[in-house]
Amino acid sequence: MEHVQIPRVKLGTQGLEALKQLPREKVQVATKFGIAGFDANGMLVKGTPDYLRACCEASLERLAVDYIDLYYQHRIDQSVPIEETMGELKKLVEEGKVKFVGLSEASADTIRRAHAVYPITAVQMEWSLWTRDIEEEIIPLCRELGIGIVPYSPIGRGFFAGRAAVQSIPSESWLTRHPRYNGENLEKNKVFYTRIEELATKYGCSPAQLALSWVLHQGDDVVPIPGTTKVKNLDDNIGAVKVKLSKEDLKEISAAVPAGEVAGSRLIGVLEPYSWRVANTPPPKSL
């Protein structure tokens, strides 16, 4: 699948109407399955064949399309062998309902086993200046297998756009519960924003653009998906592609936010059990 660096758009009612008016072949639709909801015990994750098929059929109906270009497993069901999930996804591809398959927050073992059943096109993981833990194992594996890398939260969940560092966070925002945005962690992390802000002045861009450009420069197989609800921020994100960085520039920017010095977990507690680090599945039942 060709990797095109374009903004992610979440389709509301107006977006769905616009989708109907556009030539289908000109639009790439990506969506997910896997998170079935939340209960008192936390997040509910399902990867059974019947569940994912039902999710796919429902998405096709809601989107009013005949096929989904890229269909992700949003989180890994650690009770279902990945081979069973991938087997059903392969059937959906063969039926023409899905074109390409992706995984999100999957461990290295799960990615390798899944890819053996049917080629994975993209792996979506958190990757930014302040979240770099996938660089040691996941990135090399994806490149070994020819899998595209789709970093989510490439601006550090808004941190390098100034959230909390120079702006206040609305009380209703879920970021108020994020470990890196709280108490002593936040105070320690503010220094990283200040450093990126200073470097952004040097490179003639905004801090958010510099953080996003850093991710864009990690390779031609990297397609970050910054999210925003504001047109101003969308324009700012698009402008990041104009920021050109050399290898020496990238080293300087990386050194400004040493990965091991960022304070706090990258995940809110309820999501910790579904981190890629523990997202392994049982062996196939035939073994």
Image (cartoon, rainbow, N blue to C red):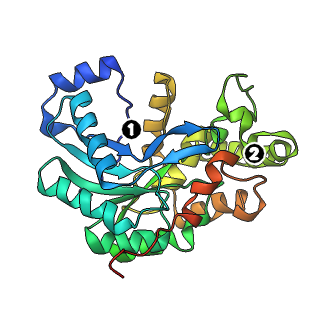
At label 2, the amino acid type is Pro
Q: Quadrant of the C terminus?
A: bottom left
At label 1, the amino acid type is Pro
Q: Is residue 136 above or below residue 263?
A: below
Q: Nearer the viewer, residue 190 or 30?
A: 30
Q: Nearer the viewer, residue 152 or 54?
A: 54
What is the crowding at mark 2: few (fewer than 14 residues within 10 Å), some, or many (at least 20)? some
Q: CA distance from mark 2 to mark 1?
A: 27 Å
Instruction: Please indicate whether residue 259 sits to the left or right of residue 275 in the image.
Output: right
User: Could you say where residue 87 lies in the image, as x and y percent from the top left?
Assistant: 26, 64
User: Could you say where residue 257 lies in the image, as x and y percent from the top left?
Assistant: 71, 57
What is the crowding at mark 1: few (fewer than 14 residues within 10 Å), some, or many (at least 20)? some
Q: Dot 1: what SS? A: loop
Q: Residue at x 30, y 75 (%)?
A: 116
Q: Which residue is mark 2?
A: 179
User: Foreground mark, 2 or 1?
Assistant: 2
Q: Residue at x 38, y 77 (%)?
A: 144
Q: Is residue 32 above or below residue 125?
A: above
Is residue 283 visible in this depiction of the protein? yes
Is residue 146 visible in this depiction of the protein? no
Instruction: Please indicate whether residue 270 sits to the left or right of residue 104 in the image.
Output: right
Q: Dot 2: what SS? A: helix
Q: Residue at x 32, y 64 (%)?
A: 84
Q: Is residue 20 above or below residue 216?
A: above
Q: Nearer the viewer, residue 222 or 68?
A: 68
Q: Which residue is mark 1?
A: 7
Residue farthest toward the front in the current orientation of the protein: 285
Question: Mark 2 touching mark 1, by CB under 8 A?
Answer: no
User: Could you say where residue 182 lies in the image, as x and y percent from the top left?
Assistant: 80, 39
Q: Earlier in the sequence, mark 2 or mark 1?
A: 1
